[in-house]
Amino acid sequence: MPETEKPLLIKRYASRRLYNTETSDYVTLEDIAKFIRAGREVQIVDLKTGDDLTRQYLLQIVAEHESKGESVLPLGVLTDLVRSYTTQAQSVVPQFLAMSFDMLREGQSKMVERAMNPMSAVPGFDAMQAQQRAFLKAMTGTWSDDESDTKPSGKDDAKSTKELDEIRSQLSALQEQLAKMKK
């Protein structure tokens, strides 16, 4: 397993100082928050007992950000979380939250993908790309996948001209559709 896929091991000493085992230096809660924001998983363990303290420290990071006015969690959500610890909903809430954040991450990655290639959301984009490839292929003299890059001659010229005219009309129809969609 590559180094970046393993959780970053942070050890808490009896003095409550947090020690980064990869860089051999002490870190703060803000440093840990930066690691997490950068996509790194962390695991915080008590040096003496070996207890996993990750949840406790992550909650502390959230609480500090919320108290500084960097509110992400609405008051109603916080209230519902507190209620979930004393009700039957306790068993459902963790699964619901995990699924919600998975959906959020998936939505964000789709938004980034669309931002990188905005035309991919246009209906018929794949067909238009195929037509463009066929058009370029026809214009550069590569008339089919199994033929060489030489231009056909004689009887094939008429066939190629007909195919080229079909491609032009299809391209024109696609351009008209795109123009209508923009209105």
Image: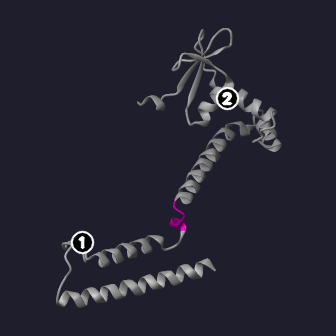
Decide: is 92 above or below 114.
above
Residue at image position (61%, 77%) is 182
Residue 151 on image: x %, y %? 21, 79
> What number is the disc on residue 58?
2
Task: Give the spatial CA distance, label 2 vs label 1.
Answer: 57 Å
At a point 68% along the width and 9% down the height, the residue shown is 15
Q: Which residue is mark 1?
A: 145
Residue at 67% from the left image edge and 29% from the top image edge: 58
Secondary structure beneath dot 2 equals helix
Q: Is 135 placed left or right of 177 in the picture?
A: left
**Quick one: quadrant of the N terminus?**
top left
Q: Position of residue 109 (x, y in %)?
A: 56, 51
Instruction: Look at the picture and state if 162 lies above or below 90.
Output: below
**Magenta range:** 117-121
Q: Amino acid at mark 2?
A: Leu
In the rendered image, the quadrant that contains the C terminus is bottom right
Q: Toward which corner of the image does residue 82 lie, by quadrant?
A: top right
Tell me what residue is drawn at x 60 percent, y 10 percent: 49
What is the three-letter code of the residue carrying label 1? Asp
Q: Position of residue 91 (x, y in %)?
A: 67, 37
Task: Tell me which label, 2 or 1, sits earlier in the chain.
Answer: 2
Q: Residues within 10 Å of mark 1 (few under 14, many from 20)?
A: few
Residue lying furthest left: 154
Query: Within the image, what quadrant is residue 51 found in?
Result: top right
Q: Is residue 64 left or right of residue 166?
A: right
Q: Main secondary structure of the magenta part?
A: helix
Which is more foreground, mark 2 or mark 1?
Answer: 1
Res 162 label: none
Magenta span includes 2 = no
